[in-house]
Amino acid sequence: MSLKPRDEHDHAAWMDKRELTAIEEIYLTALIWLDKRLRIVDYLEILENLYYKVNFQLPKSHTEQYNLDNKFWYWYPLYALGSFSTIAYVVAAISGALLGFYYAPGAGASNGTPALGYNSITFIMTDLNFGFFLRSLHRWSAQVMVAAVFLHMLRVYFTGAYKEPRELNWLIGIALISLTMVFGYTGYLLPWDQLAFWAGQIGVEMSLSIPLIGEWVAQLLFGGFTLSQSTVQRMYILHVFFLPFIVTGVIAVHIGIVWMQGIAEPH
Amino acid sequence: MSDNDDSNEVRTDGTGIVPPDDETPTWSERKTRTQGLSRLTYEYFERARREDQDLRQQSSYIERDVLAFPTWPHEMIRNLALVSFFVGMIIFLSAALPPHIGPPADSSTTPPVILPDWYLYWSFGLLKLGPLNPEISLLGGQKLLADRTYGVLANVVVVGFVAMVPFLNKGAARRPVEQPFWAAVGMSGVVFAFTIAALSVKNLAPMDSHVLFDLTFLLPFVAAFITYAVLRAMREGYMFNLNRRYYRLRPPK
């Protein structure tokens, strides 16, 4: 079987038929040449779409229509809490990556002598240029992120913004707030000072008291029923590997849904 | 098929390229012919699109073809301004109040106060609900669950309730004034978060621990009742204003 190649859409003939200026001809030739190879036509719709999105004339929002800004402007900081926690997360990620250059997890014997993890934090705080500030920035942005996330949840609750089209995002938000707290907890254990050790103790006991799967959870998260080197190691990997990927992904979905659905307006 | 006249035999082994002719369905025809889930999806999308269009054409609201503020640019521009201020606040805080580090971990000395970070106080407090764990007489005064398990379950119950809120509270009401009950539930939740946190640090609260335990569960209800009363009063005020305006426009005969 052979297929005779033929120009079904004889573009050349079509161009001859039109009386084109030199510029138009060069342009069309280039366009056809490229289109034969890259099939630009298939992407035209995207371009067109983009054009209309860029030149979109926004309809008035409810707030503008009824001139409610004069009543609502003092609530707007509460509407920024979601963005605020995202930005705090970004600050924590950057400062955390910088801290990661200098921190190494290590529990030692937990007998009151400073071990590897504790020593690297001491190094960061006393010897490293701007290290004290860096740790401070990481810690404060984490604290602020958690606070902003809690307040964000309250804002969403009291403005009824979780209602009908947005139930799914409320559930995702609950997953996010829990993950944020796990993030905080795993980070809290990393310095391996007294606070960290005994918070870890509470964590092990909590997971051991989960019915049926308690021991398995303790093994998985804490690397055993007592605190040891593997506890710090696991907390470290959770904190710098698993949680960043998971939380960043879930935040992207959360914000994507907000972007699609729009902000529930104050009424 | 003029090119094909010399090799007219039909191959049934699946080889050979069949050039498209008038009989060959186009891709959109294939799509409409498809059976099963993809067909259903396609039909549904067509219906949804038609429904959307109908609603738009029938709608008497001209001003409101958005159901919310657009995130971009309304919300984002405003947030950029507010958030840059907040980031300045983070930097200021971290420069002014740097954290210090405690003594290194020592498994042989228990510190007098063991606490997680502040945002876990509520969860830590829920672990201390042992006194609420019923001693079941059927089991001869034994507890069905260990106190620790009970505490972990309490966490699950609290988070589960918060997750169910959108499925319990339906309807178009948004403002607290429009839904005093749910606002009261929310306020009691906020107050409970604080009281249970106070319970978790009861070593520090200057109060008899039994009183503290009772207050932990009493204060949320007090807060709920106050919120409910205030919001109902506000709603009455709104209704009074509305009615007054109504009667001013149409004075009773």
Image (tube, helix red, strand yellow):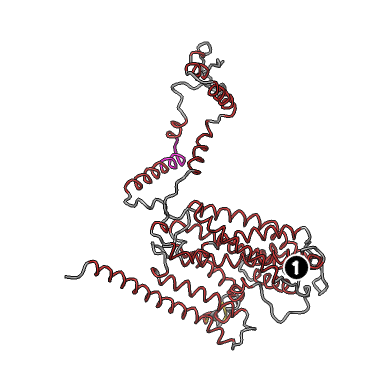
Looking at the magenta stretch, what is its main secondary structure?
helix
Which one is nearer the viewer's eye here, B4 or A21? A21
Q: Is residue B102 left or right of residue A33?
A: right
> From where the camera sits, is residue A1 visible?
no
How many dots with numbers?
Answer: 1
Instruction: Find numbered disc 1 in the image and state the secondary structure of the residue it sits on.
Output: loop
Q: Quadrant of residue A163?
A: bottom left
Q: Amino acid at mark 1?
A: Pro
Residue beneath disc 1: A191
> From where the camera sits, is residue A91 visible?
yes
- Magenta-drawn segment: B34-43
Which one is nearer the viewer's eye here, A188 or A207? A188
Residue B215: horizontal and vertical position, in percent? 53, 83
Residue A176: horizontal and vertical position, in percent? 58, 61
Q: Which residue: 56% across, 59% down?
A: B81
Residue B189: horizontal and vertical position, in percent? 50, 73
Q: Residue furthest top?
A: B6
Q: Is residue B41 magenta?
A: yes
Q: Chain of mark 1?
A: A
Quarter of the picture containing the C terminus of chain B is bottom left
Which one is nearer the viewer's eye here, A51 or A19? A19
Q: Residue furthest left?
A: B253
Q: Residue furthest bottom?
A: B208
Vertical arrangement, residue A250 with respect to residue B111, above or below: above
Q: Is residue B40 left or right of residue B94?
A: left
Q: Quadrant of residue A199?
A: bottom right
Dot 1 crowding, Cα within 10 Å, few <14, some 14–19, many 20+: many
Q: Which residue: 53% across, 13% down?
A: B7
Q: Which residue: 74% across, 79% down?
A: B110
Residue A212: horizontal and vertical position, in percent? 62, 66
